[in-house]
């Protein structure tokens, strides 16, 4: 089968960090570690596994950060390479092993790419505490080989499909997945909406675990990308009725934020400052440095960027005892001023992935909740998809994702079924 794979090396790191600043070919081109290759898929390894034909797969900002080596190396021990990329996946079931219940051949499924202890082949009494709690996005065995064998070798280390040597991700024609990773998709949900279940679930996970306390308190979502827009959607889909401010950079992103439920859309800078002042904040100018604010503020801010600039803004815009929810993949940030973390008694909490949630008095996986609310709300989330490329044009797809200003892109997909 054809698949886009990525290998990590010191030479690739050096190229990306030097030439990659002026030429994207050093990150995505022929001299990079990214290749379209012919590769083989092992047979189903055990009961409870299925073979899938990939229908659509998304490209994530995290993928760009890793391919350009801009991301922190801290998570490198929890991946294995070379790996077939892709963790936002809509697929069709083409083969099932015994023990796969509730899934039929020909059925569309959304794939949870995060690997739990049970996927690694460990029994219930051997699972880590995160997996026992249904929070496998923080699986504590991700740095170890699994008990399961594929092709006569132990399952490689790794936290997620797309960065896993043994289990191909979604940027290929076929893949394998465990039954626990598969979530049937209703026939009425179109492909471009169904493939977004993974990124939408990231926003949903944060909203379910750090929801607004009162509808009278304004909420600010910082970010222009799919996760920020997913958070806007999740807030409204779960019933938040209050003022919802979305900070976006470009007009097409602002339109999508309004479409998904934002009551106010502001640009970074003066418009965002005016929104803060509108909450009752007063500006003060220190002897040295940027202006600071007191009074008012946002009791809840979802930072879906995770940069030094966005975190600085979030810390300054939060009300006393406000909450900052960090969804952007923040890494090493030099000279970050944390003064307001203690001066305002702020709470900062990060979220990753998805898992078992409490919702409407029951326990369910985030994917199932997201799927249910997509059907209930009928929200046009498919409009987040701005570009679709065949697999062989993966370099164009990566460029469109990496340069959102030039391409006016939001969510870029690969379609392995065409071309």
Image (cartoon, rainbow, N blue to C red):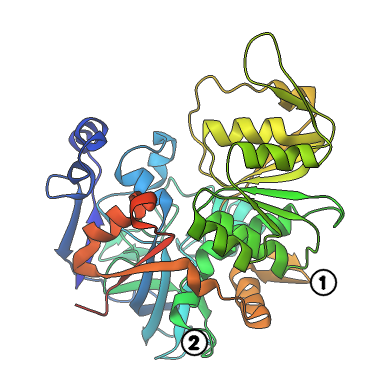
Which residue, as the protein is rendered here, is positioned at the far top? 287
Q: Position of residue 220 (x, y in %)?
A: 69, 48
Q: Nearer the viewer, mark 1 or mark 2?
A: 1
Question: Relative to residue 218, is residue 331 drawn left or right?
Answer: left
- Say if 12 sits above or below 396 in the image: above
Question: Relative to residue 341, is residue 321 drawn left or right?
Answer: right
- Foreground of the two, 361 or 157: 361
Q: Which image quadrant for residue 409?
A: bottom left
What residue lies at 43% left-to-right and 56% top-to-bottom?
Answer: 160
CA gap, disc 1 to disc 2? 26 Å
Q: Which image quadrant for residue 215?
A: bottom right
What residue lies at 56% left-to-right and 76% top-to-bottom?
Answer: 380
- Foreground of the two, 23 or 238: 23
- Say if 244 sits above or below 291 in the image: below
Q: Which image quadrant for residue 167?
A: bottom left
Could you classify mark 1 by the number of other residues whose Cα lies within 10 Å: few (under 14), some (14-19), or many (20 or more)? few
- Dot 1 or dot 2: first in sequence order is 2
The disc at residue 103 is: 2
Q: Quadrant of the C terminus?
A: bottom left
Q: Quadrant of the N terminus?
A: bottom left
Q: Secondary structure at mark 2?
A: loop
Q: Which residue is mark 1?
A: 361
The disc at residue 225 is: none
Q: Secondary structure at mark 1?
A: loop
Q: Position of residue 363 (x, y in %)?
A: 73, 70
Could you classify mark 2 by the number of other residues whose Cα lies within 10 Å: few (under 14), some (14-19), or many (20 or more)? some
Q: Position of residue 183 (x, y in %)?
A: 53, 77
């Amino acid at each position: 089968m054809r698949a886009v794979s990525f290998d990590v090396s010191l030479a690739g790191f050096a190229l990306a960090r030097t030439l990659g600043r002026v030429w994207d070919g050093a990150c995505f081109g022929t001299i990079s570690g990214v290749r379209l290759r012919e590769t083989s898929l092992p047979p189903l390894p055990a009961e409870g596994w299925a073979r899938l034909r990939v229908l659509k797969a998304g490209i994530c900002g995290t993928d760009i950060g890793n391919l350009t080596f801009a991301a922190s190396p801290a998570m490198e021990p929890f991946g294995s390479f070379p790996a077939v990329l892709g963790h936002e996946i809509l697929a069709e079931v083409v083969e099932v092993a015994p023990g796969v219940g509730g899934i039929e051949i020909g059925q569309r499924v959304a794939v949870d790419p995060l690997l739990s202890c049970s996927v690694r082949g460990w029994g219930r009494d051997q699972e880590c505490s995160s997996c026992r709690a249904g929070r496998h996005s923080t699986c504590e065995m991700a740095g170890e080989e699994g008990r399961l064998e594929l092709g006569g070798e132990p399952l490689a280390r790794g936290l997620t499909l797309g960065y896993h040597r043994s289990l191909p991700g979604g940027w290929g024609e076929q893949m394998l997945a465990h039954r626990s990773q598969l979530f049937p998709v209703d026939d009425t949900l179109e492909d471009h909406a169904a493939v977004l279940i993974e990124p939408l679930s990231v926003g949903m996970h944060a909203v379910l675990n750090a929801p607004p306390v009162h509808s009278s308190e304004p909420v600010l979502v910082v970010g222009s990308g799919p996760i920020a827009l997913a958070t806007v959607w999740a807030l409204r889909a779960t019933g938040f009725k209050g003022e919802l401010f979305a900070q976006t950079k470009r007009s097409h992103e602002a339109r999508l934020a309004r479409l998904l439920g934002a009551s106010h859309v502001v640009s970074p800078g003066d418009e965002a400052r005016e929104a803060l002042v509108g909450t009752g904040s007063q500006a003060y100018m220190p002897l040295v440095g940027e202006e600071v604010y007191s009074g008012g503020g946002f009791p809840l801010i979802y930072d879906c960027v995770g940069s030094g600039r966005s975190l600085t803004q979030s810390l300054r815009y939060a009300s006393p005892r406000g909450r900052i929810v960090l969804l952007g993949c923040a890494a090493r940030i030099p000279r970050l001023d944390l003064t307001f973390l203690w001066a305002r008694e702020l709470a900062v909490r990060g979220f990753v992935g998805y898992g078992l949630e409490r919702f409407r008095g029951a326990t369910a996986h985030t994917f199932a909740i997201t799927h249910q609310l997509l059907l209930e709300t009928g929200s046009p989330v498919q409009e987040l998809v701005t570009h679709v490329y065949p697999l062989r044009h993966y370099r164009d797809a990566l460029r469109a994702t990496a340069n959102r200003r030039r391409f006016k892109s939001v969510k870029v997909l690969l379609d392995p079924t065409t071309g």
